[in-house]
Amino acid sequence: MRAAADVNAFHPISIVDNITEEDIEQGLAYRLSFGCSHVGSADTTKRVFVTDMLTDGKSLKCPLCPIGCGLVSSTHLKSLAHVGLLTEDEAASILLIRVRELEGNFEQELEIAQYYQSGAKQCPFCFTWHMHYNNHGCHHISPRTGCTVCNKHFCYNCLFLSEDEGGLAWSGCATCPGSFCDDVCLCPLCPECKPGNSCPRCEYGGCPACVQPLEQP
Protein backbone atom coordinates (compact mmCIF):
# COMPACT_ATOMS: atom_id res chain seq x y z
CA MET A 1 0.00 0.00 0.00
CA ARG A 2 2.49 2.50 -1.27
CA ALA A 3 0.68 5.79 -0.65
CA ALA A 4 -1.27 4.94 2.51
CA ALA A 5 0.04 7.92 4.46
CA ASP A 6 -0.79 10.29 1.59
CA VAL A 7 -4.31 8.90 1.21
CA ASN A 8 -5.00 9.21 4.92
CA ALA A 9 -3.72 12.78 4.85
CA PHE A 10 -6.81 13.96 2.95
CA HIS A 11 -8.68 14.17 6.27
CA PRO A 12 -7.70 14.42 9.95
CA ILE A 13 -7.25 10.88 11.25
CA SER A 14 -9.50 9.34 13.91
CA ILE A 15 -8.09 6.09 15.25
CA VAL A 16 -10.41 3.11 15.73
CA ASP A 17 -7.97 0.47 17.01
CA ASN A 18 -4.73 0.84 18.89
CA ILE A 19 -2.95 2.18 15.83
CA THR A 20 0.13 4.38 15.76
CA GLU A 21 1.18 6.97 13.21
CA GLU A 22 3.93 4.55 12.20
CA ASP A 23 1.31 1.90 11.38
CA ILE A 24 -0.44 4.39 9.10
CA GLU A 25 2.80 5.35 7.37
CA GLN A 26 3.63 1.68 6.78
CA GLY A 27 0.19 0.97 5.29
CA LEU A 28 -1.00 -1.18 8.21
CA ALA A 29 -4.12 0.92 8.79
CA TYR A 30 -7.04 1.25 6.40
CA ARG A 31 -9.70 3.88 5.85
CA LEU A 32 -13.22 2.69 6.69
CA SER A 33 -14.52 5.12 4.05
CA PHE A 34 -12.94 7.62 1.67
CA GLY A 35 -15.57 10.08 2.92
CA CYS A 36 -14.55 10.08 6.58
CA SER A 37 -11.45 10.09 8.75
CA HIS A 38 -11.80 6.78 10.60
CA VAL A 39 -9.07 4.18 10.17
CA GLY A 40 -8.81 0.64 11.52
CA SER A 41 -6.51 -2.34 11.52
CA ALA A 42 -6.69 -4.92 8.74
CA ASP A 43 -8.79 -7.22 10.96
CA THR A 44 -11.28 -4.47 11.87
CA THR A 45 -11.60 -3.23 8.29
CA LYS A 46 -12.14 -6.75 6.92
CA ARG A 47 -14.76 -7.44 9.63
CA VAL A 48 -16.64 -4.24 8.77
CA PHE A 49 -16.72 -4.98 5.04
CA VAL A 50 -17.03 -8.77 4.91
CA THR A 51 -18.81 -9.78 8.14
CA ASP A 52 -20.93 -6.70 8.81
CA MET A 53 -21.79 -5.55 5.30
CA LEU A 54 -21.64 -8.66 3.13
CA THR A 55 -22.63 -11.43 5.55
CA ASP A 56 -24.87 -9.66 8.10
CA GLY A 57 -26.37 -7.12 5.70
CA LYS A 58 -25.54 -4.03 7.73
CA SER A 59 -25.44 -0.55 6.20
CA LEU A 60 -22.75 0.03 3.58
CA LYS A 61 -21.06 2.84 5.53
CA CYS A 62 -18.42 3.46 8.15
CA PRO A 63 -20.02 2.19 11.40
CA LEU A 64 -18.68 5.18 13.34
CA CYS A 65 -20.24 7.81 11.07
CA PRO A 66 -23.81 9.15 11.40
CA ILE A 67 -26.50 8.09 8.93
CA GLY A 68 -25.84 9.52 5.47
CA CYS A 69 -22.09 9.92 6.05
CA GLY A 70 -19.08 7.70 5.44
CA LEU A 71 -20.76 5.78 2.62
CA VAL A 72 -18.91 3.04 0.75
CA SER A 73 -17.71 4.00 -2.73
CA SER A 74 -16.64 1.88 -5.68
CA THR A 75 -13.19 3.52 -5.59
CA HIS A 76 -12.71 2.50 -1.97
CA LEU A 77 -13.79 -1.09 -2.62
CA LYS A 78 -11.44 -1.39 -5.58
CA SER A 79 -8.59 0.03 -3.51
CA LEU A 80 -9.16 -2.51 -0.73
CA ALA A 81 -9.19 -5.30 -3.31
CA HIS A 82 -6.04 -3.90 -4.90
CA VAL A 83 -4.07 -4.19 -1.63
CA GLY A 84 -5.50 -7.66 -0.95
CA LEU A 85 -7.70 -6.83 2.02
CA LEU A 86 -10.80 -7.89 0.08
CA THR A 87 -11.01 -10.46 -2.66
CA GLU A 88 -12.25 -9.22 -6.03
CA ASP A 89 -15.44 -11.23 -5.57
CA GLU A 90 -16.08 -9.68 -2.14
CA ALA A 91 -15.50 -6.15 -3.45
CA ALA A 92 -17.70 -6.74 -6.49
CA SER A 93 -20.50 -8.22 -4.35
CA ILE A 94 -20.53 -5.24 -1.98
CA LEU A 95 -20.45 -2.88 -4.94
CA LEU A 96 -23.49 -4.50 -6.53
CA ILE A 97 -25.40 -4.32 -3.24
CA ARG A 98 -24.67 -0.60 -3.08
CA VAL A 99 -25.85 -0.04 -6.64
CA ARG A 100 -29.10 -1.88 -5.93
CA GLU A 101 -29.69 0.23 -2.81
CA LEU A 102 -29.10 3.51 -4.63
CA GLU A 103 -30.53 2.94 -8.08
CA GLY A 104 -32.11 -0.50 -8.33
CA ASN A 105 -30.92 -0.47 -11.96
CA PHE A 106 -29.83 -3.89 -13.22
CA GLU A 107 -28.24 -2.46 -16.38
CA GLN A 108 -26.07 -0.18 -14.29
CA GLU A 109 -25.16 -3.09 -12.02
CA LEU A 110 -23.93 -5.02 -15.04
CA GLU A 111 -22.07 -1.99 -16.40
CA ILE A 112 -20.24 -1.42 -13.11
CA ALA A 113 -19.40 -5.09 -12.74
CA GLN A 114 -17.93 -5.11 -16.27
CA TYR A 115 -16.00 -1.89 -15.58
CA TYR A 116 -14.56 -3.42 -12.44
CA GLN A 117 -13.07 -6.25 -14.51
CA SER A 118 -12.13 -4.15 -17.54
CA GLY A 119 -8.56 -3.18 -16.77
CA ALA A 120 -8.99 0.27 -15.21
CA LYS A 121 -5.87 1.57 -13.43
CA GLN A 122 -5.42 3.44 -10.17
CA CYS A 123 -3.77 6.79 -9.63
CA PRO A 124 -0.32 5.96 -8.16
CA PHE A 125 -0.84 8.66 -5.53
CA CYS A 126 -4.39 8.29 -4.15
CA PHE A 127 -5.58 5.01 -5.76
CA THR A 128 -8.57 6.59 -7.53
CA TRP A 129 -9.55 4.45 -10.53
CA HIS A 130 -9.26 5.81 -14.07
CA MET A 131 -10.02 4.40 -17.49
CA HIS A 132 -8.26 5.26 -20.74
CA TYR A 133 -9.51 3.56 -23.88
CA ASN A 134 -7.25 2.79 -26.82
CA ASN A 135 -6.51 5.87 -28.98
CA HIS A 136 -8.76 8.12 -26.88
CA GLY A 137 -6.24 10.91 -26.51
CA CYS A 138 -2.79 10.61 -24.93
CA HIS A 139 -1.86 8.59 -21.85
CA HIS A 140 -1.57 11.71 -19.70
CA ILE A 141 -4.25 11.70 -16.95
CA SER A 142 -5.66 14.28 -17.32
CA PRO A 143 -4.25 17.08 -19.49
CA ARG A 144 -6.16 19.82 -17.67
CA THR A 145 -6.78 18.67 -14.12
CA GLY A 146 -4.79 15.52 -13.41
CA CYS A 147 -6.44 12.88 -11.22
CA THR A 148 -10.05 13.74 -10.46
CA VAL A 149 -9.44 13.36 -6.70
CA CYS A 150 -5.87 14.43 -5.87
CA ASN A 151 -5.10 16.43 -9.07
CA LYS A 152 -1.77 14.65 -9.53
CA HIS A 153 -0.65 14.13 -13.13
CA PHE A 154 0.46 10.67 -14.25
CA CYS A 155 0.91 8.41 -17.26
CA TYR A 156 -1.87 5.86 -17.64
CA ASN A 157 0.37 3.46 -19.56
CA CYS A 158 3.22 3.04 -17.06
CA LEU A 159 1.79 4.92 -14.02
CA PHE A 160 4.72 7.35 -13.97
CA LEU A 161 3.82 10.06 -11.44
CA SER A 162 4.83 13.59 -12.42
CA GLU A 163 7.50 15.24 -10.29
CA ASP A 164 6.75 18.73 -11.63
CA GLU A 165 5.44 21.12 -8.97
CA GLY A 166 4.78 18.26 -6.60
CA GLY A 167 2.88 16.32 -9.25
CA LEU A 168 0.48 19.16 -10.04
CA ALA A 169 2.03 19.95 -13.43
CA TRP A 170 3.09 17.83 -16.40
CA SER A 171 6.06 18.03 -18.75
CA GLY A 172 5.82 14.52 -20.14
CA CYS A 173 6.41 10.91 -19.12
CA ALA A 174 10.00 10.07 -18.24
CA THR A 175 9.49 6.35 -18.96
CA CYS A 176 7.38 5.85 -22.10
CA PRO A 177 8.91 6.64 -25.52
CA GLY A 178 5.65 8.19 -26.75
CA SER A 179 2.51 9.78 -25.36
CA PHE A 180 -0.11 7.92 -27.40
CA CYS A 181 -1.29 4.33 -27.80
CA ASP A 182 0.77 2.02 -30.00
CA ASP A 183 0.91 -1.67 -30.95
CA VAL A 184 2.13 -2.72 -27.50
CA CYS A 185 -0.25 -0.53 -25.53
CA LEU A 186 -2.61 -2.45 -23.22
CA CYS A 187 -5.36 0.19 -23.12
CA PRO A 188 -8.70 -1.61 -23.65
CA LEU A 189 -11.06 -0.99 -26.56
CA CYS A 190 -13.84 1.51 -25.97
CA PRO A 191 -17.15 -0.33 -25.47
CA GLU A 192 -19.14 2.62 -26.85
CA CYS A 193 -17.32 3.19 -30.14
CA LYS A 194 -18.67 1.34 -33.16
CA PRO A 195 -17.58 1.39 -36.83
CA GLY A 196 -18.79 4.71 -38.21
CA ASN A 197 -20.15 5.85 -34.83
CA SER A 198 -17.49 7.17 -32.45
CA CYS A 199 -18.18 8.03 -28.81
CA PRO A 200 -17.81 11.69 -27.68
CA ARG A 201 -14.47 10.92 -25.99
CA CYS A 202 -12.93 9.51 -29.17
CA GLU A 203 -11.11 12.63 -30.36
CA TYR A 204 -10.13 11.49 -33.84
CA GLY A 205 -12.60 8.71 -34.65
CA GLY A 206 -9.67 6.43 -35.37
CA CYS A 207 -9.61 4.08 -32.41
CA PRO A 208 -9.55 0.33 -33.21
CA ALA A 209 -13.21 0.01 -32.23
CA CYS A 210 -14.22 2.69 -34.77
CA VAL A 211 -12.34 1.28 -37.75
CA GLN A 212 -14.59 -0.14 -40.46
CA PRO A 213 -13.89 -3.88 -40.95
CA LEU A 214 -12.26 -4.78 -44.26
CA GLU A 215 -14.61 -6.25 -46.83
CA GLN A 216 -13.95 -9.89 -47.58
CA PRO A 217 -13.12 -10.59 -51.26
Image (tube, rainbow, N blue to C red):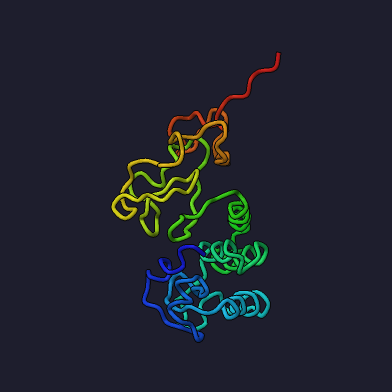
Residue at far right of view:
217
Indicate the position of residue 12 as horizontal and vertical percent values: 36, 77
Residue 151 sits in quarter: bottom left
What residue is at 58 percent from the left and 61 percent from the top? Answer: 82
Image vertical order of residue 170 relative to residue 148, above or below: above
Say which residue appears at 60% left-offset and 49% top-offset. Answer: 118
The mark tally for this picture is 0
Viewer-nearest residue: 193 or 82: 82
Q: Left or right: 59 with respect to 124?
A: right
| Residue drawn 43% across the image and 34% down it | 203
Is 149 above or below relative to 29?
above
**What percent of the width, then of the height, locates residue 204?**
44, 30
Outermost left residue: 165
Percent position (x, y) of residue 125?
43, 58
Of 181 and 201, nearer the camera is 181
Q: Residue at x 66, y 65 (%)?
A: 87
55 left or right of 211 in image: right
Task: Name which quarter of the figure residue 35 lies in.
Answer: bottom left
Furthest toward the bottom, the residue is 18
Q: Percent position (x, y) of residue 81? A: 60, 64
- When the figure is inspected, residue 134 is found, relative to residue 166, above or below; the finding is above
Q: State the quadrant of the C terminus.
A: top right
